[in-house]
Every structure is written in C-alpha cells, then in structure tokens.
Image (cartoon, coloured by chain):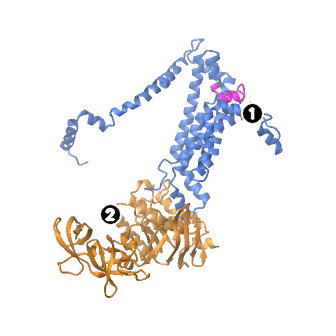
Chain colours: A orange, B blue
Amino acid sequence: MASRTLAQTGSGFESLQMCGVSRTYGRTRALVDLDLELTRGEFVALLGPSGCGKSTALACLAGLQPLTTGSIWRDEVRIDTVPVEKRGFGMVFQNYALFPHLTVQKNVEFGLSMRHVGRDERRRRAAAALDLVQLTDHAAKIPSQLSGGEQQRVAIARALAIDPEIVLMDEPLSNLDAALRIEMRTEIKRLYQERDLSVLYVTHDQEEALSLATRLVVLRQGALVQSGTPKDVYANPVSAYVASFMGYRNIFAGHVAARAEDGAVHVVADDLELVGRLVTGGGTDNTAQGTAVTIAIRPEDIRVAAPSAPNAIQVMVEVVEFHGRELAVRARTNRGVAIHFKTEESVVAGHPATLCVPRDRVLVFAR
Amino acid sequence: MTTTVEGRADTELARSRQPLKHRLADRGIDWSLLLLLPAVLIIGGLFVYPFFYGLSISFEPLKGSNPLSNYTDFLSDPYLRDSIVKTLRLALPVALVSVAFAAPLAFQARRNFRGRQAITLVFMLPLTFGSILIAQGMIRVFSDGGWINLLLQMVGIPKQQLIYNYAGTFIAATMVTIPFMFLLLMGFFGGIDRSLEHAAGTLGASKAARFWRITLPLASPGMVTAFTLALVEAFAVFPSAILVGQPDNATHVLTLPIYAAASQHSDYGSAAAIAMIMTVIELIILVVLVTVRNRIYRGPATGGKG
C-alpha cells in the first residue's frame, strides 16, 4: 500500500526527515548521526568539500545505499527500508546517467513506462517535460548526439517527467563549463519556481548553493555543521570551517590580546592587530587573554582607507587582477601575511596601501 | 564554403612549404610505425603466405586433372560431408552454453565482493591446463566409476555414458571456453556505468527491469562478440574430439578429416581443400554475427561525462 502512495504525484507530502542517519564503509564513517529535514517547497542545498558525506546522504535518501543506523521518514511513513524503485523521488546525477541506447524521448518516457502509463499519455507527458527544458526538437536523437548542457537538461526532464514530489540533485552542474553552469543554474531555479518543487541539492560550490537554495546545510565529515538561510549562513558562519566555504578567503590563526567593550575582542595574528566580533556558535564565551582563535575576513569587506582609520592594516600590494568592475588584489603585511581584498579604487602592484575592515566583519572563532 | 579560390591556393602553398617529415606526421606516418614490422612479417610469413599456398595446392589433386576434384571428393562422400554438420552440431551448442553459463557469473563479478578474486582465479585455471590435460582428468572423473557417476547413482539417477561420445567432447570444449567467455564478459559488464542502473532504479525500475531494459541491451554487443569467439574456438576442437569423444562417429568434426588427409595419406591438397571449406563456413557465420551485432547497438555504455 505504501508503495502505491509513494509513486503518486506530490499530494500529501509535508516533510522528509533523516533521523540520526549514519553510514559506515569499513572503517570510514561517511555519515555520522545526521539529522536533516526537507519540508514541502524548500530548496535545500547540501554544501561541503568532497568526502564530507553529502553525496552519501543523497544516495541514502534515494535508496541507492543502505543506512548503517538511523531512519528516514516521509511524514509518518518510514521509507528507509523501501527499495529505490518504490520511493518515487526524481534524481539527477552528476554524470547525467542518460541511457545511451535509448533516444531522448525514450529516456524521458522511461519512468512513465515503468509506471505502466499508457502510450499516448506517456508521449504527452514526455513531450511536456521536454518542452519544459526546451529540447522538443531533440526528442529523436540519442544522448551522445547532444552537448553536455543538453544532456543535463534531458536528465532533468527525465527526473521531472514522473512528477516526483521530491527532486534530488547530485552536483548536476559540476561537469559543465563555467558559462553553461550559470545558465543551467538559472534554468534549475526557474523550474523550481514554476513547478513548485521540493529539491535537495548537493554541491561543493558555494555560489551555486547561495544562489539556488532557500536553506543551506553545511556538512563536515558526515555531520551537520550549520543550517540556515543563505543570507544568514553567508553573514554569520558558525565556525571557521563554514566561513572558509562562504567566501571568507582571509583566514588567520591568532590569539586574543584583550577583551573590548560590547562583545568585541582584540586579536593578534602575527603583525596583524584587529578588533573583531567573537562568534561563539552557542558555546561558552571563552575570551581569556591568550586564547587561540581563527580570524576570518571576506575580501569584499576590506576597503582601502586613510592611515588613521580604525582597524587599519598597512600592506604592500603584490598582485592585482582585473575582474571587470573591480580589482582582486593580494597584498602582504610587513611580516609577509597575505591579505586578499577587492576594491574599485586603483591600486598598483609594488606600492604600499592602507586597508581597513569594519570590526563586525572581522569574525573571530575560538579554536 | 566561403573560402575563395585564392585563399585555398594560399593554404596549399603553405602546406607544401612545410618539411616532408611534418607533412607525413600529419597523416600519422613516422618512425614509430616500424614497431609494426615484426608483427607484419610474422603474420605475412606464418599466416598469409601459408593460407594462399594452401589455397593454391587445394586445386592440385594428386589424381586426375579436374582442379576441383579435392572439393567434389569431400562434398560427395556422405561420411566426410557429414563432418560439417557434426562440427556445427558441436560448436554452436558449446558457444551458446558457454556464454549462457559465463554471463551470469560475469554479471555478478562486475562489482566487488568478498572472494571475488578467488573465484576469478578458479575460473581462469582451466585456461592454463590445455585440452589434453583436461581430457585426461575427464576420463577419470566421468568414467563409469568416476565421482560424477557415483554422485548420480547416489541421487538415484542411472549411470550415464559421459565420455567417448558427443557428451564427452561437448563437456571438454565447454570447460575450455567458459573461462574465456567469463573474462571477456566481465570486461563488457564492468564497462557499463553503474549509475545507469541507479538512475533506472530512481525512475521506478525493479531489479529485473533494470537488467532487461538497461544492462542486457548495453551488454548484448559484447555477448555477441563473446559468442563469436567461443564459436571460432569450438570450431577448431581437435584433441578432445579424439581423446574423450567418438572420433569415428558422433564427434567426427572437420579437423579430423583434415588431419587424416595430411598426416595419414600425405594428401596435402585434399587437406587444404577441407580447411578452405571450414574457413568459408566460419566466415559466413562471422559475417552473420557481426551484422547482428551492428544491428543491436553500437555506442558508449556510459550515460554522459564522468
């Protein structure tokens, strides 16, 4: 009975939950007690470096890999023992996984014919799915005759043709070149909005995650580190690890020099002396003098300023890259600490400069 | 399309100005081609020349002046002619059974499991034995008092004659062919991207549907290739046809009259004629199978980049 309802279209589903899921291969622990929730209409991006367990989480959810411990629930129904073919999720793979011996049309129809949908109905729905990804003219071709972007669009059409209540995407854009990646990203966002989908999206690309997701989940070594809206995670990473993913390119190891007023701390890293905001992440507020900390600053938050500005850094400009609207610059302090920043002002390599950072944009994490 | 005549002349001029070495390299001709020389000499000296020599002496009968008499003699003698049928009756089932037996094993062995290497090794052992050793072992195992017959009697099946007849040669030939098929098919199945089965699974295909709709169609060109090789192998069966078969009757395969003509009657022309007939039959079967294979599907077994 459960299988029949699962294979149906999106009515009824409110939330999908992974509860305490672990997955162990031999001695490697790919997932460690992971709790993850996807509610209807959400676009959740699972973000992390390769090997953090994000793809494993997706494979467990899809039923392609068994759980070592834990359970997966779709509302009140436990589904982690349901075989993959009965879960009814649409899945898009990193390598597209199109059936090379079938035409585009047959690829898209595959899920429908597995559901014993009649021929005319199947044709109609496949045509609609192909129309959605604007590939109607390519229906008679076989996958190897298509470009990478077209193949990925077929893969998306194939996953959507079965009207899945949940779509799982495993790094779907990582095999495309830069320009196509941005185009397909917009395309995925359009489909998400138009079709009212619920999506779980795995990626290692923060830009992709930030631009697509309604909620971001950062994983580290198989465990959840932070979950929140892209805006929130971007502005307030809970750890240096998350910060490094959110574009905080300047990361220094330092220590606390003194406690300042209103939650600020004076920190020192080599010859850098800054006032920053301590991020406790809900833990204890340990700011004793000499505490080892990690300091994270985004290149965009650093500005060229007058020498008297607060939080000033004296540097020698080393490399200047032209990025169109702005310059991306690497500079070094007297003692050789590398500072990355972006500016629209003209900066010349080999010349000294004074930089400054607002104190609430200097994030300080206890180590 | 839009290149003008002058433009084309220019490029041609530019090409002729390049040194000869570069122009040859452009067409894939360079010194490394010399590496092919030993192979070309060996094939030419040991295969092409003897083949055409054999073809020419097959038209020079020992008696009479009719150049085709070696062929007509063979085809008009019912006992000799029948060896064509006997060869086919042996080779086709051997090839079919070996592929049918090796395919499921190879399908399982495409992924890693505990003991996979041990099983692969056991399957490859017969390759190292050679058909004479296998035949010697078979004589003991399949004889009246061998353990196969003892086993059959234990479960209540009457004693079977499993050697010195068709069954003996069939078993021996199959045993040698299966390891070949296993190795070949393992490569073919292993070349099929696993994510295709996963994708089919997420689209609602059961295990059986994944096999019939995805894996088998993608593996079938490989299976036809394997079948073709098994057939060629079984066509040339010789020692086991004598040692564990019934060489004067049920396993009087084409290689036996060739051997008889050449070694017992010193009639090389006649032996060559029979060999030519065997070659033609094999070529016909090969053409048919290659045509079938090209009709099925010829393309990648992966679903995109990856």
- For residue A179, which numbered disc appears in the image? 2
Q: Residue at x 45, y 71 (%)?
A: A219
Counting from the top left corner in percent of width and height, residue B90 is at 66, 34
Tell me: residue A298, above or below residue B122. below
Does any portion of residue A272 appear in the rendered image? yes
Q: In which quadrant of the rendered view does residue A238 lie?
A: bottom left
Q: Residue at x 53, y 43 (%)?
A: B293
Q: Residue at x 59, y 28 (%)?
A: B278
Q: Residue furthest bottom?
A: A262
Quadrant location, the C terminus of chain A: bottom left
Q: Is residue A44 magenta?
A: no
| Disc 1 chain ID | B
**Cα separation between marks 2 and 1:** 71 Å
Q: Residues within 10 Å of mark 2 (few under 14, many from 20)?
A: few
Q: Is residue A222 left or right of residue A6?
A: left
Asked whether A158 or B33 is in front, the reply is B33
Of the residues shown, which amino acid type is indicated by label 1?
A: Arg
Tell me: residue A240, above or below residue B51. below
| Disc 2 chain ID | A
Counting from the top left corner in percent of width and height, residue A28 is at 52, 62
Asked whether B27 or A126 is in front, the reply is B27
Asked whether A214 or A338 is in front, the reply is A338
Q: Say what secondary structure mark 2 lies in.
A: helix
Which residue in the structure is indicated by mark 1? B140
Which residues, given as a range, are shown in magenta?
B239-255
